[in-house]
Amino acid sequence: MIAINSVFKCIGDKRIRIIDIINEFVYVVDIDASTSMPQKELIKTIEEEMDCEKLILIKDPFAKIIDEATLSKVQTYKREEDWDFILKYLEVNKRKLLEKSTRNDTLKEIADSSGLSLSKVKKVFSRYWQRGMNKNSLLPDYKNSGGKGKDKSLSKNKVGRPKRVNYNGEIIEGINITDDVKTHFQIVINKYYRNKKKISLKETYTLMLRDFYSDSYIEDNEIKHKVWDESRIPTYDQFYYWFKKLEDPKKDIILRNSSKEFELKNRPILSNSTIETNGPGTRFQIDATIADIYIVSSLNRNRIIGRPVVYAIIDVFSRLITGIYVGLEGPSWIGAMMALDNMISDKVEFCKKYNVEITEEQWPSKHLPEIIIADRGEFEGYSVENLINNLNVKIENTSPYRGDLKGIVERNFRTINTKIKHKAPGAIQKEFRERGDRDYRLDATLTLEEFTTIVIKMVIYHNNKMIDKYPMEKEMIKDEVTPIPIKLWSWGIENKKGRLRVVDSEKFRLNILPKGKGSVSRAGIRFKNLYYGSKKAIEEQWFIKSKVRSIEIVYDPRNMNQIYIPYGNGMDYEKCYLLEGSTQYKDCILEEIIFNEELSSELKEREKNKQTQINIDLDKEIEKIVKKAQKEKQKFVSYDESKNKKLKGIRNNKAVEKEINRVAESFDLGEDKKEYKEKNTVIELPINKDKHKSNELTGKARLMEKLRQKRDEKREK
């Protein structure tokens, strides 16, 4: 299928982009030319060239992540300026610009109306078409330009507004706004203006003059201030100019009112809501609900893990479900992100993971829409900017008074929950249980994976189910189309074209996946208590001794077997694999990993007091044995022996003790202890009656003498 924004490589290394499809024609531009106007081709011709491989679908060379923080003020300013131009002139003149016969006159009219040169107008349109048809496609190719917006280098002479004469006829030259003066401005704005007292800017200026540009004196036991003359103080106009230049409207509103006030009345409106659609892909609705069922852990089915969250994305035109997510993540960006990723995924491969075999005709959606309608809470986070600027997807937030805008997806949630109540164990049967009723949570049986499989089956059913009260168009009735999502989707692509676009899945994921910080140590790259390694980390010896201690990573909460390190300005990434020490969590989703880590910590905490008591008891037992040994030693203390004599016989003493232990520890198989004692014979050791010659004994004789003495001591006991 030919999709808008696709990039193809032609014979001779020429590359073209599909910028629009109208009826049987497509419009393309050369993305490598300095400027390029649309060329008109038959869809049939493009398809034939694709079949014979004269045209080869390639990755978009301009698709990359652009971090807003890295853009200069000049780049941002020029981008916004050109974007306003595109919004004002492109849509209303689109058909005239696409057609060669009307293009030149239209370009001249736009140049006259906008006040721009004809070459500038062509350049802006060309850059927009060539580089991906999104806001960031209009970024200039340089980081800094000229000196516009830069602070002037100051000298002793006054810059800016010329000197003036006051009401007394005195010439007032004023002062230059130095860094010190700007610091005074910033201090008083933060101290007096940005707080709940809501004092005016004029009063803030007066307080600044009192604090920094006045002399204080005491009169009637009161501290008073005399402001300096006008030639030594900044004027209110200067103060106001720098306030506007350094102004942070969001910060001012939040600090002077509240964050709730900002979100309610002053937050930027990303797009205007409208319910009209022009075929599949014009508008997708996204919403989430908590399923009316309790599920169990895949690691232990006796462990109930609560109710799952179901996300669904539905095409407004055809009612086709284009993406789902089933997990434990509540209404947040992470949950919505997973549904968005599923939205552009190949559904045949997705279903195969859950052992559900389908054909592409049963679930054909894997595209990016023009507009996504969502609740405010779901699309809070940094990734929304990437979605808007890098992928040119508009976000329409539903207002409190327009709940009907996401009514389509909400009705499907009611259908899912109704079906679950009748079929699945662990489902919530009624809102309140009466005394004596069985707790339905105890009936929980399905794991998250099994429940996801059920939802997939219901999606396939929905996509092939007739829709009640669908507003059929005359053309649909004429073509004998029944209101079934799959058929409406196919009919819309063929007759309406819509706004479906293709996008590289890896670039899309890098734009929407959540980011985190990983720490590097000898054990690996640590993230969420899991350890990872990568080829790049090993080659650059991160794990031996490196200055790299913390890195930014991108991860997928549904598959923690690997994480990703983006580099190359978002054009590429390094994949990191789970190390052996963390393989017990292989193929587990992040929710289950966190759940089990928390459970492990809870069990350790529960055993903490018991372990402390065991340690205390061990210390007491050791002390008891030591005290007993010390008492026994006192019985054999000889004060006549020198220290040298006591230490000299250690080797022989050890040999004697070793022989005694051998006798005590020896095995005698085949006889019980009683018979052994009766038949036991005493080995008489030779007695050396000449005690004076005992010192002359050496070798074995001395050892036998020691054994004899030990034997006599035991008999006396």
Image (cartoon, helix red, strand yellow):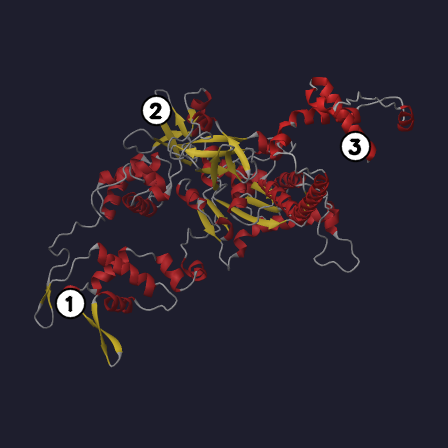
> Along the line of sight, which residue is nearer the eye, 292 or 617?
617
Q: Note whether 35 is above or below 191 in the view shown.
A: above
User: For the residue marked with disc 1, what is the amino acid?
Assistant: Glu
Task: Give the mark, 3 or 1, whose residue is nearer the N terminus.
Answer: 1
Q: Which amino acid type is shown beneath numbered disc 2?
A: Lys
Within-10-Å neighbours for mark 3: few <14, some 14–19, many 20+: few
The foreground one among 476 and 638 is 638
Q: Residue furthest bottom?
A: 220
- At x 64% / y 40%, what residue is drawn? 452
- Residue at position x 64%, y 51% from top? 414
The earlier-in-sequence mark between 2 and 1 is 2
Q: Residue at x 28, y 41 (%)?
A: 106
Q: Is residue 473 visible?
A: no
Real-space CA distance between mark 2 and mark 1, rounded to the nearest whole angstrom: 67 Å
Hey, what amino acid is under mark 3?
Glu
The reply to whether dot 2 and dot 1 touch (C-beta < 8 Å) is no
Circle 3 residue: 713
Looking at the picture, how far across and down is residue 506, in whole percent? 47, 33
Q: How many marks?
A: 3
Q: Which residue was labeled with disc 2?
A: 14
The one nearer the camera, 643 or 304, is 643
What label sits on residue 230 in the rendered view? Answer: 1
In percent of width and height, residue 246 lies at: 29, 55
Image quadrant in which you'd find residue 390: top left
Query: How would you rate the neighbour count of disc 2 (Cα within 10 Å): few for under 14, some for 14-19, many for 20 or more?
Result: few
